[in-house]
Amino acid sequence: MFSVFSVIFVIVFVIVMGGFVAVAVRGIATWGKNNASPRIPAETKIVAKRLSVSGEGMHHHGTDIHMHHHDSSSTYYYATFEFNTGDRKEFQVPAQEYGLLAEGDIGVLTFQGTRYISFERKI
């Protein structure tokens, strides 16, 4: 016979697993759509940059005598590009390129669907 705890546990487990499956399916669908999209070069201007930090930060585990510090966070880098039409689109960019991009730079952005490929600055 099932107890109330067993039923609640199963319901929570199904909801959590359903969330994981939904995120995975959405990621695979986006990846497939990007791969099926053409690579598009377009003249753009960088109008904004931002970063997003997510994660846990510092945690303390154990007693005061045996303190352990863990720092687990992720930083994501974004740049917003404005097309000649006035439309804007934000892309996640690699960390090593983020520092090389400056607001006001004009150049050719190459992208594929929602995927950033490259930006070549005009001199």
Image (cartoon, rainbow, N blue to C red):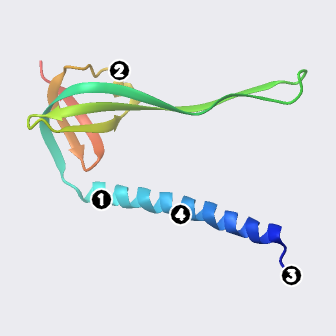
24 left or right of 44 in image? right
User: How much space separates mark 4 and mark 2, taking CA atoms?
Assistant: 35 Å
Q: Which residue is mark 1?
A: 33
Q: Is residue 67 left or right of residue 113?
A: right
Give the mark nearer the N terminus: 1 vs 2. Answer: 1
* Residue at left offset 81%, top offset 67%: 5
Q: Is residue 9 depicted above or below 99 in this figure? A: below
Picture quadrant where residue 79 is located = top left
Above or below, 20 against 85 in this view is below
The secondary structure type at the circle numbered 3 is: loop
Q: Which circle, 4 or 3, is nearer the viewer?
A: 3
For marks 1 and 2, give the CA distance.
28 Å
Give the number of marks: 4
In the structure shown, which secondary structural element does the residue marked by tag 4 occupy? helix
Q: Badge 2 local density, few (<14 within 10 Å), some, or many (20+)?
A: few
* Tag 2 residue: 99
User: Residue at 68% across / 64% down in the picture?
Assistant: 13
Task: Tell me the kind of residue under disc 1.
Answer: Lys
Q: Say which label, 4 or 3, has the lower sequence index.
A: 3
- Residue 19's spot in the image, x, y percent? 55, 60
Q: Earlier in the sequence, mark 4 or mark 1?
A: 4
| Disc ID at residue 1 | 3
| Mark in front: 4 vs 1 | 4
